[in-house]
Each structure stands twice: as C-alpha cells, then as structure tokens.
Image (cartoon, grey):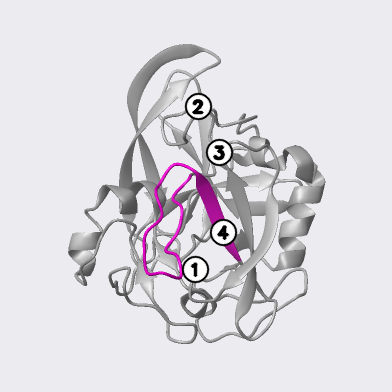
C-alpha cells in the first residue's frame, strides 16, 4: 500500500528570500526510491530525496558529475554498542558519544541526529565481499537500489572535482559543525560533508569537529580497508586505509 508521509523542513532561500520559513513536503512512500518533490512556497523549489523503507529515514541526495550520492551520513541502526566493543570481523554499530546498547535511546542522541551512525567495516559490508569495480555492486549496509562506493568510485568523484580542492567542494561551509578555519569549504556540490569523526582502534570516540571519514567497499588486505578523509584545515580529500575495526561514517551511491 502506498502511504503519504509529511515531512516538515526549514528552508533558507538564498537567492530570493533570506528569511527562514517552515514548509511542508508531501511524499509518496515508494520503497527506497529517489524522487523530486515540490515544496509549498512562493518560490517553487525541488528537493531530491531517498526514502529508506527499513526505518523511514529520509535523506537528501545530490548529483555530482554522473554519480548520485546521499548528501547526509547513513543513520541505519539495527543495534548499537559502546566504543569499548570492537572487532575486525563482527559487525558493530556506534553513535559517537553514546555508550549504551539501547537503539531507541541512541537515536535521541544529538550526534545520531547530526552525524548518523559509525560502522566498522564488517557492519558496512553486511556479509558482501570486497570490490574494486566501478560500480562496486556491493549493497552492504545501504538501502535497496543503492550501494557502497568502491575505491574506484571515490576516485571518480575526486578526479571530477580535482582531488587537491575536492574536500572544500564537499564540506559544509562555515564553522557550525567544523572546527575553524574549515579551509576552502564551499559545499558547492551540496554533498555537505560533516566532521562526525570516528571510533578509533583504542576504543575511543575521537573529538567531533576535525574529520569526516567515509568507508569504501574496497579492502587493502585482510585487516585493512580504504576510506576517504576530509579534514578541517585542508582543501583536499585524503585516500587512506585503516584497520577494519575502526568505526567510520557511510555515504551510499545510487545504482
């Protein structure tokens, strides 16, 4: 059955109207779909969204070159543990700053609402094998119709934007969430990378504000996998690998 969802958002019309206003988006719930929805306002505005049927979360999406990306970190949270729990092979899900095991409670945490969930690589892959292809073909933790970006898909994105300045084009501008100086941040892509940071291999949530770390679906070896790093005082996007036990954020890409 198709049911209507009503979502209230706050929009700031930078081109025509600098005053914030509350508008309502009426969506038809089409499983894991992406669509354009008109917002009731004097200036006709269109927003692209992904509806995740697993938990009802709704994400903005953005096209960059030939790719369509989630413009928010994934929030799918089937269970949750504190930062002291870690494994390279057993899936673990974290909310930065939350040390309990209650999913409903974790979802009320400000860091869940702002930065989404941190996943170790096993949780990210959800039983799928590493992939080096473009597209990866790895759904992993992503909603149906979407997949985890391979290392090659990240390279496609950063090459398109020019890796040396791609971080600035992907980062949310300003210092509401990022530490100063948030070098080169323009968010001209609409990707809105946020510094949710990560759960490190010492079992600690690293301070929020400095880094945006995003997994790929490509392993380096049995213990390490590739990820992308965007830093508060750099314009570029770093390509690095880290232990699969680490808890990083996830952005999915459309099939």
Specify which label sits upstream in the sequence, 3 or 2: 2
Specify which label sits upstream in the sequence, 1 or 4: 1
| Residue 161 visible in the picture | no
Q: Rate crowding at label 2 as few (under 14), some (14 to 19) or many (20 or more) other CA atoms within 10 Å.
A: some
Q: Residue at x 21, y 54 (%)?
A: 108
Residue placed under numbered mark 2 in the picture: 174
Residue placed under numbered mark 1 in the picture: 143
Residue placed under numbered mark 4 in the picture: 214
Q: Quadrant of residue 64?
A: top right
Residue 185 % position (x, y): 61, 31
CA–CA distance between discs 1 and 4? 17 Å
- For the N terminus, the quadrant is bottom left
Horizontal side of 3 relative to 199 (left or right) equals: left
Q: Residue at x 51, y 73 (%)?
A: 124
Disc 2 is placed on an element classified as loop
Q: Which residues are magenta?
A: 195-215
Q: Nearer the viewer, mark 1 or mark 4?
A: 4
Residue placed under numbered mark 3 in the picture: 232
């Amino acid at each position: 059955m198709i049911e209507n969802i009503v979502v209230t958002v706050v929009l700031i019309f930078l081109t025509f109207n600098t005053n914030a206003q509350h508008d309502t988006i009426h969506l038809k719930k089409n499983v894991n779909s992406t669509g354009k929805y008109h917002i009731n306002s004097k200036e006709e505005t269109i927003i692209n969204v992904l509806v995740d049927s697993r938990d009802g979360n709704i994400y903005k999406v953005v096209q960059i070159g030939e790719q369509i990306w989630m413009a928010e970190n994934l929030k799918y949270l089937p269970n949750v543990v504190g930062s002291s729990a870690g494994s390279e092979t057993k899936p673990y899900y974290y909310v930065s700053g939350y040390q309990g095991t209650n999913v409903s409670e974790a979802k009320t945490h400000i860091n869940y609402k702002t930065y989404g969930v941190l996943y170790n690589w096993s949780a990210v892959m959800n039983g799928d094998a590493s992939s080096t292809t473009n597209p990866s073909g790895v759904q992993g933790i992503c909603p149906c119709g979407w997949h985890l970006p391979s290392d090659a898909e990240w390279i496609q994105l950063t090459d398109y934007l020019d890796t040396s300045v791609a971080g600035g084009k992907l980062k949310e501008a300003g210092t509401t969430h990022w530490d100063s100086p948030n070098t080169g941040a323009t968010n001209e892509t609409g990707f809105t990378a946020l510094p949710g940071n990560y759960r490190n291999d010492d079992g600690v949530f690293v301070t929020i504000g400095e880094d945006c770390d995003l997994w790929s679906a490509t392993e380096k070896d049995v213990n390490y996998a590739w990820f992308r790093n965007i830093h508060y005082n750099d314009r570029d996007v770093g390509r690095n690998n880290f232990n699969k036990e680490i808890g990083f954020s996830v952005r999915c890409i459309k099939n």
